[in-house]
């Protein structure tokens, strides 16, 4: 039997057919039809499922489930998208619309942070834990929680917004309208903005060399790579970043007393260069006097597809 996992984003629709060992055996990628009615997305999804079935020599009888991860607010029990700004989806009955095309197959819908958390929980860095946090550090900051051995869907079913917890009331304005959210201070975007500012102020820094003097080449990775060389400007930015992230993690820690906190997304590729000072800083700020287990995510870019395929 095959399970289909959709990872739908504002740029692409990623989909994979996943076998019983949770391996992706076939995959497709299609541009997301921006600005078009959701029915167009559903039609593309239907075609993609048939392409995957054909490639794997299967039929709809071999489909155990279709899971869909969406970047937005989801009503899991109703199978509807309440709002997904990047997709332009508002009050969309996604599960019913896909279910209509595959009447014999169970269809599941969830937030993409929860599908990534589920993938890490079943197969990655959250495996075996009863209480854990996944924080994804990318363009924005998302994440999910494992509570009592399950993905926590939120008390009222709205999920959790770890990226929108306030850590600085006077901080930068967030896309959500508040100030100083974790997302504004711990995303790759923050590193990029600080890197660009540093480049314009001191063009001779290592950030400038790594970006070959071009502003549009500066991103979070360039700043981290420059910090790794010991460049003082980049090290100062990175140190502030670690400090901000440690404030967020120590707050999650006092709230949850988690067994493990997992970092995913582009920034987590910095590995121990990030994790080691971060553990130290979280310990200093935390109420608890032990060193928290903070590790990098293991599932990479496949987390979205596999997590969606794991939905039940
Ligand atoms: Zn926010």
Image (tube, rainbow, N blue to C red):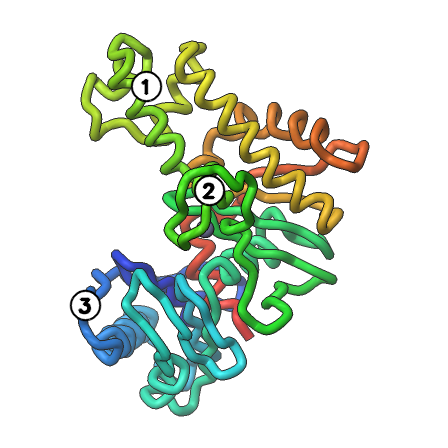
Q: Nearer the viewer, mark 1 or mark 2?
A: 1
Could you give the CA–CA distance between mark 1 and mark 2, rounded to whole angstroms?
21 Å
Residue in the image at 62% along x and 40% along y? 249
Label 1, on which residue? 198
Number of marks in the rendered image: 3
The secondary element bearing badge 2 is classed as strand
Which sits earlier in the primary sequence, circle 1 or circle 2?
2
Which sits earlier in the primary sequence, circle 1 or circle 3?
3
Which sits earlier in the primary sequence, circle 2 or circle 3?
3
How would you rate the neighbour count of disc 3 (Cα within 10 Å): few for under 14, some for 14-19, many for 20 or more? few
| Marks 2 and 3 in Cβ contact (< 8 Å) | no
Q: Nearer the viewer, mark 1 or mark 3?
A: 1
Camera-side residue of 1 and 200: 200
- Where is residue 166? Give x, y as percent: 54, 46
Relative side of 125 to 67, left or right: right
Residue in the image at 71% along x and 50% along y? 255
Q: Disc number at residue 26?
A: none
- Where is residue 261? Give x, y as percent: 64, 44
Label 3, on which residue? 35
Tell me if I can see residue 33 in this picture.
Answer: yes
- Where is residue 171? Give x, y as percent: 47, 37
Relative side of 34 to 220, left or right: left
Label 2, on which residue? 137
Camera-side residue of 111 and 108: 111
Quarter residue 199 falls in: top left
The secondary element bearing badge 3 is classed as loop
């Amino acid at each position: 039997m095959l399970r289909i996992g959709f990872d739908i984003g504002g740029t692409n629709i990623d989909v994979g057919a996943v076998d019983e060992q949770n391996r992706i055996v076939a995959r497709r990628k299609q541009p997301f039809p921006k600005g078009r009615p959701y029915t167009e997305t559903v039609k593309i999804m239907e075609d993609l499922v048939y392409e995957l079935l054909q490639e794997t020599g299967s039929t709809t009888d071999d489909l155990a489930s279709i899971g869909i991860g969406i970047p937005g607010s989801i009503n899991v029990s109703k199978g509807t998208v309440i709002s997904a700004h990047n997709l332009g989806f508002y009050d969309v009955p996604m599960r019913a619309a896909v279910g209509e095309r595959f009447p014999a197959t169970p269809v599941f819908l969830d937030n993409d942070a929860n599908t990534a958390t589920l993938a890490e929980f079943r197969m990655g860095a959250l495996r075996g834990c009863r209480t854990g946090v996944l924080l994804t550090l990318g363009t924005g900051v998302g994440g999910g929680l494992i509570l009592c051995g399950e993905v926590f869907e939120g008390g009222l079913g709205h999920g959790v917004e770890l990226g929108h917890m306030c850590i600085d009331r006077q901080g930068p304005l967030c896309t959500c309208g508040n100030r100083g959210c974790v997302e504004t201070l711990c995303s790759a975007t923050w590193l990029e903005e600080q890197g660009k500012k540093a480049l314009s102020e001191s063009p001779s820094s290592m950030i400038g060399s790594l970006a070959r003097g071009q502003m549009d080449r500066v991103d979070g990775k360039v700043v981290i790579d420059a910090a790794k060389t010991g460049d003082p400007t980049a090290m100062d930015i990175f140190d502030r970043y670690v400090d901000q992230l440690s404030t967020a993690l120590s707050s999650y820690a006092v709230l949850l007393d988690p067994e493990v906190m997992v970092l995913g997304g582009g920034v987590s590729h910095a590995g121990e260069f990030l994790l080691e000072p971060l553990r130290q800083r979280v310990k200093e700020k935390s109420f608890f006097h032990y060193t928290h287990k903070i590790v990098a995510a293991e599932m990479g870019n496949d987390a979205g597809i596999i997590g969606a395929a794991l939905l039940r």
